[in-house]
Image (cartoon, rainbow, N blue to C red):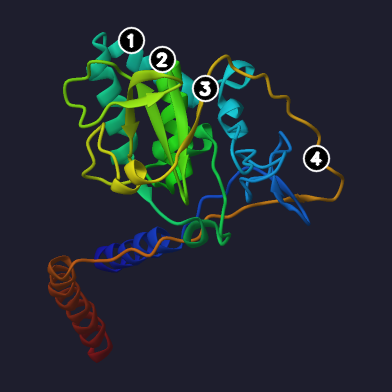
Amino acid sequence: MKNKLGLLSLFYLIFCAISSAAVCQPFYKSRAGIYDAWHICRTRPQGIDGYFQLSEDKFHPLIVFESLGRNADIAYKLGEEFRARYPDSYQRAEAIYNFVRDRVRYTHDRDQFGYAEFAQNADELVQEINKGKARGDCEDYAVLLTTMFKAAGYRTAIVLIPGHAAALVFLPGYPKARTFLTFSQESGWIWAEATGRRNPLGWVPQKALQGEAIAFEIGRAEELVRKPFPKGEITEIQRKRRIISISPFFFIIFIMWIIPMISRIFLVTFLRRGH
């Protein structure tokens, strides 16, 4: 009986790990895209209601302010905790950067949400980090990093190059910097590219040095106000299930463990029927 329970428990855990999927907070859907409680479009960076309000030569990352000011929540509090824990500004910046880089797995929006674009705000991503299953793409990393840098006492910005977003942090004199960038006629800005697990703070992709970039410094918090959803338009955005891969070594161990167990269960059942 114990063997049967152990076997059933194992299959139950495997099934739950493969089939579970986190569900985001409610949004509302219109012809123009998927909108959140601040009426910001999460599936489009362009336009006056896009999450970055992107136009031809400028942008305004509205989605960052969903986690600042009166809307400050777990992401901002996490940045404040790093400020208290690391008095050295260089170590603190590295700790924040490494935290985000190591706990968020790079995943395309279509693979996670089923949309070509779907931006997450900083608090939504920290919620997933707390669950141990955070995934995101470049704008998600950038939004979370700038929110935490801001809370930890840094000047910070989001930078865009064609097809990509990243964070900047003002860290003049940082000894590990490969390149100091100039923004708003000030040198000392560091590129924070957390999308690669091996990227250190200050690593800059080659295409960022070759093309044109535009940046927006996160200054005083803009007080975004939540608005009622249009009637009958509420929808839920589901994260797609993650497929768990098992290494050949653990697969062999599993087979070596499961076959004798099944054999013992079959033998006991056979002997009982014989008596």
Front residue of 50 and 126: 50
Q: Residues within 10 Å of mark 1 (few under 14, many from 20)?
A: few
Q: Are marks 2 and 4 in contact (CB under 8 Å)?
A: no
Residue 100's x, y, as percent?
34, 35
Rendered location of residue 42, percent (x, y): 63, 46
As helix, strand or loop, the secondary structure at mark 4 comes to loop
Q: Is residue 126 visible?
A: no
Could you tell me if the residues under marks 4 and 1 are in contact, i.e. CB atoms within 8 Å? Answer: no
The amino acid sitting under disc 1 is Ala
The residue under label 2 is: 80
User: Which of the two labelled residues, at mark 3 and mark 2, occupies the earlier sequence position?
Assistant: 2
The part of the image, by quadrant, that contains residue 68 is top right
Amino acid type assigned to the residue bearing label 4 in the image = Phe
Residue 1, quarter of the rendered image: bottom left
Mark 3 neighbour density, 10 Å: few (under 14) some (14–19) many (20 or more) = many
Residues tagged 1 and 2 counted as in contact (Cβ below 8 A): yes
Q: Earlier in the sequence, mark 2 or mark 4?
A: 2
Which mark is drawn over residue 218? Answer: 3
Which mark is nearer the camera, 3 or 2?
3
Instruction: Name which residue lies at 59% across and 35% down.
Output: 59
Q: Look at label 3 and name its amino acid.
A: Ile
Residue at image location 47% in from the left, 62% down from the top: 111
Of pointers 3 and 1, the one earlier in the residue sequence: 1
Q: What residue sits right under mark 4 in the picture?
A: 229
Q: CA distance from mark 4 to mark 1?
A: 38 Å
Q: Which mark is residue 84?
A: 1
Q: Amino acid at mark 2?
A: Glu
Q: Secondary structure at mark 3?
A: loop
Q: Residue at x 48, y 21 (%)?
A: 76
